[in-house]
Image (cartoon, grey):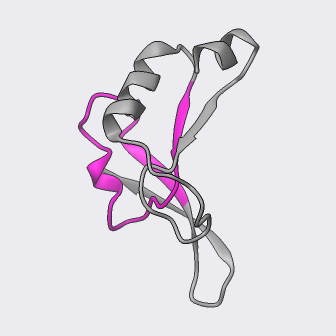
């Protein structure tokens, strides 16, 4: 993460923070690792992987989320991707 920031990254996508059906080969990272990454850089860190309305609150209140408003993409029943926003 630090190396990516030094190389000029604008933000980091970190995950999967939860099991995801879209990338079956993705390995989950612990919330402790996510927190460590967030604390080690000065650029935004975007948690990715398996985030939805059923588990997003597990990321809130842990000291590593910078906003109380979150957005994520989910596949709708008709198969299209949709953006969902919520406040925690």
Expressed as whole percent of the image width and height from the top left, the position of residue 3 reads 65, 14
Residue ranking furthest to the right: 8
Image vertical order of residue 45 relative to residue 4, above or below: below
Image x and y of residue 80, in percent: 69, 80
Q: Residue 14: which quarter of the image?
A: top right
Residue 1 quadrant: top right
The residue sitting at 70% across, 23% down in the picture is: 10
Q: Is residue 46 above or below residue 66?
A: below
**Residues in magenta, as a range:** 44-72
Is 13 left or right of 88, judged from the image as shown?
right
Viewer-nearest residue: 73 or 1: 1
Specify the farthest residue to the bottom: 78
Q: Is residue 65 above or below residue 20?
A: above
Secondary structure that dominates the magenta span: loop
Residue 66 in the magenta stretch? The answer is: yes
Could you say where residue 83 lies in the image, as x and y percent from the top left? 59, 64
The residue located at (64%, 90%) in the rendering is: 78
Tell me where residue 84 appears, x and y as whole percent: 52, 63
């Amino acid at each position: 993460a630090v190396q990516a920031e030094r190389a000029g990254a604008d933000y980091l996508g970190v995950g999967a923070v939860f099991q995801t059906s879209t990338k079956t080969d993705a390995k989950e990272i612990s919330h402790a690792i996510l927190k460590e990454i967030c604390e080690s850089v000065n650029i935004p860190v975007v948690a990715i992987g398996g985030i939805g309305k059923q588990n997003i609150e597990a990321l809130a209140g842990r000291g590593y989320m910078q906003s109380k408003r979150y957005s994520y993409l989910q596949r709708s029943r008709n198969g299209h991707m949709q953006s969902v926003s919520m406040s925690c």
